[in-house]
Structures are given as C-alpha cells and as structure tokens.
Amino acid sequence: MRTKFKQWAVDYLNEGKNILYLKNEEEIKNFVNNKECFLEIGPGKGQFILSIAKKYPQYNFLVVEINKTVAGIALKKIDEENLTNVKLIAEDFYKLVNIINENSISGIFLNFSDPWPKKRHEKRRLTSSPFIESYIKILKNNHNIYYKSDNYDFYLYSLDKFKEYGFDILKNETNYNDDEEFDALTEFETRYKNEGIKINRLILKKGSNIKMNKLNELERKYFEELTQKDAISGNEKEVAHYLALEYKKLGLELYKDYAGNIYGIKKGGDSSVKVMIDAHMDEVGFIVKDIKDNGLIIPYPLGGFNFQTLLSNRVKLTTKNGEKFIGAIDSTPPHLLKGQTQEVNASNLLFDFGFTSKEEAIANHVGIGDMITLIGGFEYLNHETRILSKALDDRYGIILGLSILNELKDVALPFDLYVGGSTQEEVGLRGLPSAIKNINPDFCFVLDCSTAKDSISSSEYGRIGDGVLLRFIDRTMIANPALLEFQKEAVINTNGKYQYFETLGGTNASVAFSSNCLTLTHCIVARSIHTASSIMDINDFIYAKNSLLYMLKNLSKEKILELKESKY
C-alpha cells in the first residue's frame, strides 16, 4: 500500500534529531562502526525498529527510506522515543552502499517489502540481484538477513534469489508465529496476524558459499583494456598481441596461422580429443579508401552498420606504423539542409582528422587501407551491473575465453582445449576455416554477442539481462537439440538464466558445423551492437561463464560420442 504524500512529514526531515545526511560521511561511518550496527530498509511507520532498538540498546540500528513522507513519519516516532541507537537516512539505499565500508553491517532487516509483481519492475524488488549484491558487499561474513513477507509469490521469488547467490538458509517458514527473540512486530504484521494471514519468514546467512554476480579483478581488467583495443577485420593485431601475452602468462602453447587466428592450448589427458572455444577478434570499422584534396578521408566500411547512427561520431585512424589520429565523421548542420534529411550511406561518408590537404595526410603516413575504428569509451552503468563500450561484439567472447582459461588453470581436463580468437568474422566468417581445418576439433563452442531485441520489439527473445541464448536457429545453422539440452542443463545447474533465441544473422558456428564438428553457440545479447555505444548486462556474462565451465567439466570422450550419436 502506497503512503499518501504528507507535507508535514517531508518538512520534518529538515528539523528531526536522529537523521543522518549522506554529505556527512564520517558521521555515518562512525555510527555504523562504533557498535554492531543493523540495517532496516523500508521501516514503514517505525514500529519494528523502535521495538527492537529498545530490546537491544547495546546495538545501533540504521534505517534507510527513500520515500520522504514515510521517512518523515518514521523519523518523528524515533525522535519521540528519545532513542540514541537509531538513526534514519532519507536517501537511496545504493548511495549509502557507496559510503559505508564493506563487511560492516551486522544484519539486514527486510520486512514486508513491496513485491513489485510486474516483470518490468523486477529491479525495484528489494531481493532482486542488484540489491542482493549490495547486501553481500556490506554485510559481515557469517551474519544474517532477516526477511518477512505476506506475499507468497514474492517469498518464493526471494527464496530463489537468495539460493542463487549461495546464502545459507537458516530458517524457512511459511506460517511464522513471531516466536524469535531477535525480532519484533511491524504495523503490517500486527494487522495480518489479527486477520489470520500467514507470514513467510526467512533467515539467510552470508556464509562461505556466497556467489557474487560481479566481475572479478582480472575480468574487469580484460573488459577495460580489450574493449579499447582497435581491431577491424583483417587487422586484428592489437587483440591478437594481447591474447598472446595472456596465454604465455598461463604457460600455454600457441596456435597461430596465416589467417591471423590465435589460440592458447591447454593440454589435457587425451590429446586425441580436441575441444575448441572460438570468439572473433574483429569489430566493425573502416579502412581508408581514398584521401580528398582537402584532406578529408573517404572510408570503406567493413561490417554491418546502421549508417544513420554514425554522423558526428568520433573515430580513430591507425596508420600502418601504429600512429593514431583522432577525428570525427563529417555532418551537415540542420539549418543548411534546407528542410531535407541528410541521408547517410557508404557512398557519402567523409571522415575529418584535421588534415588540411591530401599532401598533409600523406606526410603523416596516412595511406590507403589504414584502419579506422569508432571511439567508444568504457563505462560501468547502474551500480556496475552493466557495461557501455564499443566492440562488445565480440570482445565479450574473447574475454570469456580468457576468464575460462584462468578458472581452469589448475583443473585437469580429459581433452586438449583450444581457446582463442579468429579473424574477419564481420566480413563473412573468413578467418575461422583455416583454424578449423588445422585443429580439427571434436567439439566447438562459438562465443558471440548478438543483437538485443528488447528495445526494438515485443519479442520474448533477446532480452538483455535474461541470460544465455539457446540459439536454436539462425541464417546459417539449425542447432542440434541434444546440444541445446546440454547447454540448458548447464545453465540450470549453475543457477543461471537462459532464453531461446532466433535471428536472421549468423556466426562462426556455421564454419565449425560444416566441418563435421559438434558445434554450439554460447552467446549473450547487447543493445546497440555495431555502434560506439553497445550495452551489455554483467549478469549475462556471469551466467555464460558459469554454464560454460560446467559443460567443459562435464565433457569427455564418451560424452562427445554420446552427443554425436544423439543426432541419428
């Protein structure tokens, strides 16, 4: 039930005694750290927190409420009780998380939170992934979250989410009778008990099994560095060089070929069995086609573009000797278009790198065929749950491959594992054939980043944040149902998410598939791929990593034979 706006309550926030302000960070930290401190998110009218604070004066209790009316009502009651161990913050919970120390809260109370039943509001639920990850961050190890709700569906959702993150379930009751010492009644709970409504109760411990859906330090490094490498079709050297150095750090042998493909080889128990993980190194981009007399560059596009997204984008030119120049894609201001729309296509693009003449460009070593890439800086979005960058297609796959190799560093596998990057995927799957022919794998996982559809269609397929793609059909391949079941089993057994997906696009999977090799795509989606501003969800990456590790750990010569025979 929503509380009606009350001006007096909002005004009281400016005169109350027991309120803390985010600008006073040291005051907040002192309150949290000078005693064991418990946190309640969403206090209602304050009955619960006041009761438990009186019972346990040896502890501090911090209340967070973003609704100003609710916060003002609760603060007035706290002040009237003259308690010194309760403080209120009338701000967004996430802002508090960025202030207090990690592992500093002794317990968290979630009492009758709004269930936000509609799917589109899931991120508002206090037990959705972003909130739980914040709780893990601030809650002390081996300390508890205390949860109560009258909404059975919300209780089931919350239970599943806490299980997903590896919380120890200390208590799980669907008809709770308020029989715990470390508890108190809320306003809602008193009413529900009188009406005979059942209360669902969970106590959840942050123990040793906790799993965080966040990038580890090495993955953060890979994303921040590899997305900013420049590597178009036919000129993937920057990414290939990076991979070679990482593979050598892991002590791996290298496979290289004339097409520019590169793979690290993790030797296993039986070298007659080969499993391959492929991702393409190239991003969409341009090469210099010609230089005009006035110094402007005529580009030749490599890969699929929506040309209407390009005007005024900043771009980077890399010469054959490695010099880099920053520029922009030329556009005409609207007042000079005389009411016409500026149609953009491959034939009328011009890039401006500041050169005043053709001779000046040549003097700066610019030549035909030089690489040009879109500039799209790396950023975290929404409390580091999503990533904004260029080239997520397919640096996602390149980074996932590196992460897998690090995870398996000390794991013995019953096969040789080839993990790496292929070339020229964006211009027609041209690089991988030579690697497939030379390596001749028995099983090939193809990692790629597909187009999210949730911003352009009401389709149930291709939603960012909804997990690994079970890509059952595309323009170039129909997936083997047994392999899709294997993939689905892996996602379920690692507490991930999956979604079915179909598309008119294609991937390198068709190359491996046509070579008589078991082939499975293991993809996620991102919005605005093939632009300077692609967006992906980190949860999708984690789901893909965990499920791929599961499949690799459950692959063997016998399993591969079983999967091959399932087709017949």
Image (cartoon, rainbow, N blue to C red):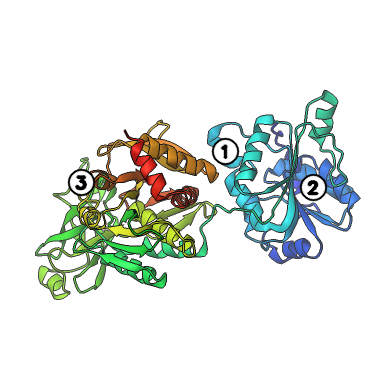
- Does any portion of residue 20 appear in the rendered image? no
Name the residue nearer the viewer: 335 or 14. 14
Which quadrant of the figure contains the N terminus? top right
- Looking at the rendered structure, the secondary structure element under dot 1 is helix
Percent position of residue 516, x then y: 25, 44
Give the numbered dot on residue 122: 1
The amino acid at mark 3 is: Val
Name the residue nearer the viewer: 477 or 198. 477
* Residue projecting furthest to the top: 195
| Residue ID for mark 2 | 75
Query: Badges 2 and 3: C-beta atoms under 8 Å apart?
Result: no
Determine the image quadrant of residue 390. Answer: bottom left
Percent position of residue 528, x then y: 35, 46
Classify residue 338 as left or right of residue 16: left
Q: Nearer the viewer, mark 1 or mark 3?
A: 1
Circle nearer the N terminus (2, 3)? 2
- Does any portion of residue 529 appear in the rendered image? yes
Within-10-Å neighbours for mark 1: few <14, some 14–19, many 20+:
some
Q: How many marks?
A: 3
Residue drawn where x is 74% and y is 51% of the image: 144
Determine the image quadrant of residue 459. Answer: top left
- Looking at the rendered structure, the secondary structure element under dot 3 is loop
